[in-house]
Image (spheres, rainbow, N blue to C red):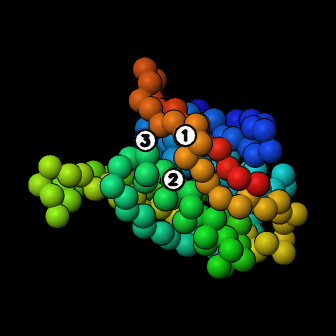
């Protein structure tokens, strides 16, 4: 279980697997970090927490990765060693038939000055895939570089 970086036209893609939904989100986020830098210092940076909500499971992955990119820019830190503590589906307040998804996560923020970072501009919905498979979950996400 983990991730693999794949070339994608002028972009970069991450193919990730995990034995749980949380694990595949973590692996995809770690793939984002790897697409951003080849060499990440092992003990640099402090952990921070984040919460993300969305209307669908795929949108939750998109928004989680987008939030990591946003936090990288705002905090001037590369989020690495990503941990997703929980992912939950709850009934949305506005529509009894709707479901809202949320996740609680954390990452270690490595100062951008401590890494040779490439700019990953954004996560895209282009070819995005998140699906349950026999031995867990698979995700495929393309990032604009």
Q: Earlier in the sequence, mark 3 or mark 1?
A: 3
Determine the residue positioned at 66% across, 40% down: 14
Q: Which mark is residue 62?
A: 2
Q: Is residue 86 visible?
A: no
Q: Identify the secondary structure beneath mark 2.
A: helix
Determine the residue positioned at 88% across, 63% down: 116
Measuring from the top left, give residue 26's x and y in whole percent: 55, 49
Determine the residue positioned at 71% across, 61% down: 121
Circles 1 and 2: CB distance less than 8 Å? yes
Q: Identify the secondary structure beneath mark 1.
A: loop
62 or 3: which is nearer to us? 62
Q: Earlier in the sequence, mark 2 or mark 3?
A: 3
Spatial CA distance of label 3 from label 1 is 15 Å
Measuring from the top left, give residue 134's x and y in whole percent: 43, 20
Measuring from the top left, give residue 71's x and y in whole percent: 61, 72
Decide if residue 116 is on the left or right side of residue 44. right
Q: Earlier in the sequence, mark 1 or mark 2?
A: 2
141 up-or-down from 43: above or below: above
65 or 143: which is nearer to us? 143
Q: Identify the secondary structure beneath mark 3.
A: helix
Q: Residues within 10 Å of mark 1 (few under 14, many from 20)?
A: some
Q: Which mark is residue 128?
A: 1
Instruction: Determine which residue is flagged by label 3.
Output: 21
| Quadrant location of the C terminus in the rendered image | bottom right
Q: Residues within 10 Å of mark 2 (few under 14, many from 20)?
A: some
Circles 3 and 1: CB distance less than 8 Å? no
């Amino acid at each position: 279980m983990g991730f693999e970086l794949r070339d994608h036209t002028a972009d970069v893609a991450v193919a990730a697997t995990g034995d749980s939904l949380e694990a595949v989100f973590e692996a995809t986020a770690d793939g984002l970090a790897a697409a951003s830098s080849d060499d990440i210092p092992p003990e640099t940076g402090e952990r921070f927490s984040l919460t993300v909500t969305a209307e669908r499971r795929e949108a939750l992955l998109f928004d989680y990765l987008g939030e990591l990119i946003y936090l990288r820019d705002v905090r001037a830190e590369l989020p690495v060693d990503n941990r997703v503590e929980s992912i939950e589906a709850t009934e949305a307040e506005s529509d009894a038939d709707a479901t809202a998804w949320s996740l609680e996560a954390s990452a270690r923020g490595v100062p951008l000055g401590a890494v040779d970072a490439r700019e990953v501009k954004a996560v895209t919905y282009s070819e995005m895939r998140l699906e349950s498979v026999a031995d867990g979950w698979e995700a495929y996400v393309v990032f604009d570089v």
